[in-house]
Amino acid sequence: MQIQSKALPQSFSLRGAFLRSTAPGATSHPMLVFTAVVLLALFAIVQIDLHSAQLQAIGLLGHGATGIDPIFLGP
């Protein structure tokens, strides 16, 4: 007597559900789009922070020596 695993049919049904959910013409959930945009923005901020010295060297970032205008620092 053979014991059949139930994992195989479950994986096929999950695969089918995934393929049906990514059908052409399907729209994305607004929260998913918002999350993707926020994560991309955070990734861009981290990359700019990590490579700020190189970006300053080629002139894409302001120079760190200029600082903040004293008018905006407050009393």
Image: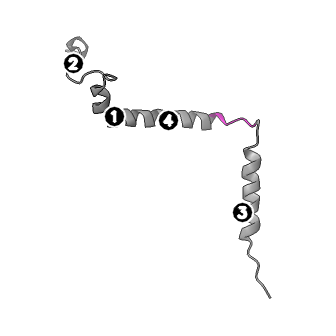
Sort mark 4 into few (<14), some (14-19) or many (20+) by Cα contacts within 10 Å: few
Q: Disc 2 on helix, strand or loop? A: loop
Q: Residue 27: x, y in percent?
A: 72, 35
Mark sitting earlier along the chain (3/4): 3
Residue at the far top: name it: 71
Mark 1 lies on residue: 49
Q: Disc 3 on helix, strand or loop? A: helix
Mark 2 lies on residue: 66
Dots 2 and 4: beta carbons under 8 Å? no
Snapshot quadrant of residue 24: top right
Q: Amino acid at mark 4?
A: Leu
Q: Nearer the viewer, residue 69 or 60?
A: 60
Q: Amino acid at mark 3?
A: Ser
Q: Disc 1 on helix, strand or loop? A: helix
Mark sitting earlier along the chain (3/1): 3
Mark 3 lies on residue: 11
Q: Is residue 37 left or right of residue 49?
A: right
Q: Nearer the viewer, residue 60 or 21?
A: 60
